[in-house]
Amino acid sequence: MAAAAARIHSAQPGGSALSGQLRVSVSEGFGNSFIAPRLAGFVAAHPELEIDLVASSGFLNPSRREADMAVLLARPRKGPLITRKLSDYSLGLYAPADRPDWHEAVATTPLSRAGIPVIGYMPDILYAPELDYLGEIEPGLRANVRSSSVLAQRRMIAGGAGVGVLPCFLASGDPALVRIRPDQVIARAFWLALHRDVAPQPRIRAFIDWLDAEVRESRGLLIPG
């Protein structure tokens, strides 16, 4: 029944404009800092679409039809889904620009002994294991200033509360942030997942084509260097 309803809803008789609701679940950082600032072109091209961008700490489940598609931090292993990698991306260690003493200290001293606060996620409410990356900076490194929001972490680092790991696409271009230890690169990937019943819908295909194009054009931002 769901598949039949999807086929009916996807029909666009007479070549009419795309319409209906499109709900996309995406991580907070990628949704707010990458998709949202670029969405105007897609909205202008498809003014009859209702677009829900659910950008939060956590994901809606396309398997249960909570969203039409999701941009996830790992490839789902089960469910009636079509999945593929959207893009790789890089993360790095960042510090406030107005703390050159920290920049010098981190270059020569392990963070665990530098006396500098470390900002990161709360391990007991980590919504994806791919976010547990402080150990890739230094084995056993723990955050002592924590937030469930990567946007809050960015503001805390920029405001001088400590140093921490941020996606490069989120931090680059911010004059309040400086990347330290640039040779340390954390590699992750975004995965696109959608229920197989909605895959043929023209509005789904249109959004995926648009997102693919934006990712290709911004490869240098997602993977600096």
Image (tube, grey):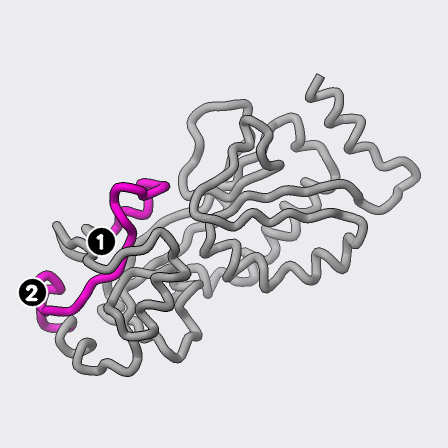
Residue 218 picture location, percent across and down: 52, 62
Quadrant, the C terminus: bottom left
The relative height of residue 208 versus residue 39 in the rendered view (above or below) is above
In this view, the residue in front, 181 or 3, is 3
Q: Amino acid at mark 1?
A: Leu
Residue 224 located left or right of residue 3: left
Question: Quadrant of residue 18 in the image?
Answer: top right
Residue annotated with mark 2: 113
Q: How many marks?
A: 2
Q: Nearer the viewer, residue 38 or 119?
A: 119
**Does residue 25 appear to the left or right of 160 in the view shown?**
right
Pick the quarter of the image with the N terminus.
top right
Residue at 22% x, 53% y is: 134
- Name the residue furthest top: 1
Q: Outermost residue, left direction?
A: 113
Range covered by the magenta-colored residues: 107-134
Residue 131 position within the rendered picture, expressed as x and y whole percent measured from the top left: 32, 47
Q: Say what secondary structure mark 2 lies in.
A: helix
Q: Earlier in the sequence, mark 1 or mark 2?
A: 2
Within-10-Å neighbours for mark 1: few <14, some 14–19, many 20+: many
The reply, left or right, for residue 55 in relation to residue 181 is right
The residue that label 1 is drawn on is: 134
The residue depicted at 82 percent of the width and 32 percent of the height is 11
